[in-house]
Image (tube, coloured by chain):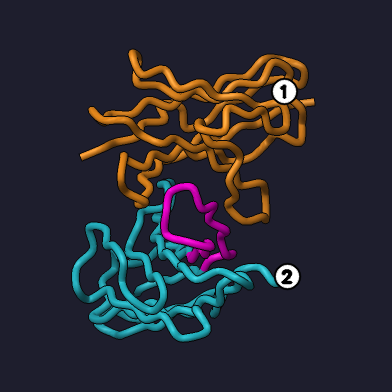
Chain colours: A orange, B cyan
Amino acid sequence: AQRVTQPEKLLSVFKGAPVELKCNYSYSGSPELFWYVQYSRQRLQLLLRHISRESIKGFTADLNKGETSFHLKKPFAQEEDSAMYYCALIKGGSYIPTFGRGTSLIVHP
Amino acid sequence: ETGVTQSPTHLIKTRGQQVTLRCSSQSGHNTVSWYQQALGQGPQFIFQYYREEENGRGNFPPRFSGLQFPNYSSELNVNALELDDSALYLCASSSGQGANNEQFFGPGTRLTVL
């Protein structure tokens, strides 16, 4: 079965510092990968998906099939980036997502 | 456009009881998925409904069941509640069942089983 691992429960950085939230997956096929975000007192929402190859709010994520990773990166963190981030995988031909346990990002002023 | 709504917000039940949670999908959406999120964990897929039919199921026992109505709203029913069923239950709606259809989440229902 597929698995998504987010090794860091908490990531704490200062404003302006680079941030990288790690996501590793185990799946032998071609997955679709997503990052979801939940800001304080808000709903879980989609941040970005790998097939779109887009940058959202300055965040990017590259699928590395060799390392089976989909790390989320931002060169200069902002205080408003503080939130809970979840990585999710959908295996090929399916629509059922598997979520990681989440990483709490705190950006200090 | 109205977003996904869930009711109730909080619920306390005792072991062995039954519970029904409700979800209204976003306008124009015909697909509803339910998730269980235990404390400190990510959402875990329970099942999905597409045009009133169960369309896929995660690793949950049969005492977790659901319905989708003609207006695409949905219910999650859990029978014979266990302590481990205590969790946040999330509903998400989308305009189709494929992975390319973005899911829009509701605020969740917090269930506590004593």
On the image, the x and y values in percent for residue A14 come to 72, 20
Residue at 27% over, 62% down? B57
Amino acid type, mark 1: Ala
Question: Mark 1 = which residue?
Answer: A77
Magenta range is B91-108
Which residue in the protein does label 2 denote?
B1
Q: Chain of mark 2?
A: B
Q: Chain of mark 1?
A: A
Q: Please state the horizontal and vertical placement of residue B83, each as a whole percent of the image.
A: 29, 68
Q: Nearer the viewer, residue A37 or A64?
A: A64
Examine the structure image and report whether residue A17 is included in the region drawn in magenta. Answer: no
Q: Is residue B95 on the magenta stretch?
A: yes
Question: Percent from the top left, x then y, of residue A4?
Answer: 35, 34
Cα–Cα gap, marks 2 and 1: 32 Å
Position of residue B111 in the picture relative to residue B18 (left or right)? right
Residue A61 or residue A92, whichever sits in front: A92
Give the answer, above or below, for where B6 lies relative to A97.
below
Q: Is residue A109 above or below residue B25?
A: above
- Quadrant in the picture for the C terminus of chain B: bottom left
Answer with left or right where residue B63 lies relative to residue B35: left
Q: Amino acid at mark 2?
A: Glu
Secondary structure under the numbered disc 1 in the rendered image:
loop
- The image quadrant that residue B68 belongs to is bottom left
Residue at figure coordinates x 51%, y 53% from the top left: B101
